[in-house]
Amino acid sequence: MKNDLSLSRRTLLKAGALLTGASLISLEKADAYAPALKTPALTAAEIAAIEAAIGKKGSYKEAEATYTIPLPRNDLKVTLKGEAVPISFGFGGWVSIKRTMDVNRQC
């Protein structure tokens, strides 16, 4: 019997993205970054908030200032001409989070 409170993967991802976006928005911080041309790095606290909202850990690429979380698909069974294809061959997904700035904004 299906639980009436179950949520789809898509609904959970949307909710996580909304929660993460809401927790990362801070207008006071945006003014401090306006003169800089380089994308500011995410803090450890922000990364922890992202992990808590999505429920998975990922990796941070410092050169790109991007935090990426892989979302593998273990529910797929793919075959090609009768041969099983490993899901790791590109059938997964991911989400990347990066702080953005409006460099055209006039202070």
Image: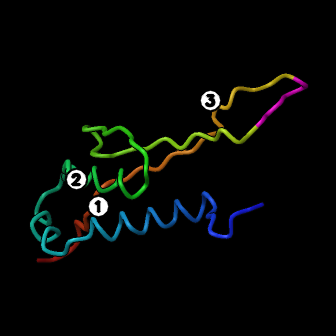
Q: Earlier in the sequence, mark 2 or mark 3?
A: 2
**Residue 100, numbered label:** 1
Q: Amino acid at mark 1?
A: Thr
Q: Do the numbered discs 1 and 2 sit on residues whose CB atoms are within 8 Å? A: yes
**Residue identifier under label 2:** 39
Q: Secondary structure at mark 3?
A: loop
* Residue 92, x across and y down, in percent: 61, 40
Dot 3, how many residues are within 10 Å of its Cα: few (below 14), some (14-19), or many (20+)? few
**In-image side of 86 versus 64 (left or right):** right
Dot 1, how many residues are within 10 Å of its Cα: few (below 14), some (14-19), or many (20+)? few
**In-image side of 98 versus 96 (left or right):** left
- How many angstroms separate mark 1 from mark 2 (CA)? 7 Å
Q: Do the numbered discs 2 and 3 sit on residues whose CB atoms are within 8 Å? A: no
- How many angstroms separate mark 1 from mark 3 (CA)? 30 Å
Please tell me which residue lies in front, 35 or 52.
52
Dot 2, how many residues are within 10 Å of its Cα: few (below 14), some (14-19), or many (20+)? some
Q: Residue at (20%, 71%) from the top-left corner?
A: 26
Look at discs 2 and 3 and give the one toward the viewer.
3
* Residue 68, x across and y down, in percent: 40, 44
Q: Is residue 78 magenta?
A: yes
**In-image side of 22 versus 44 (left or right):** right
Looking at the rendered image, the quarter that the C terminus falls into is: bottom left
**Which segment is the magenta one?**
77-82
Please tell me which residue lies in front, 42 or 5.
5
**In-image side of 31 versus 102 (left or right):** left
* Residue 95, x across and y down, in percent: 47, 50
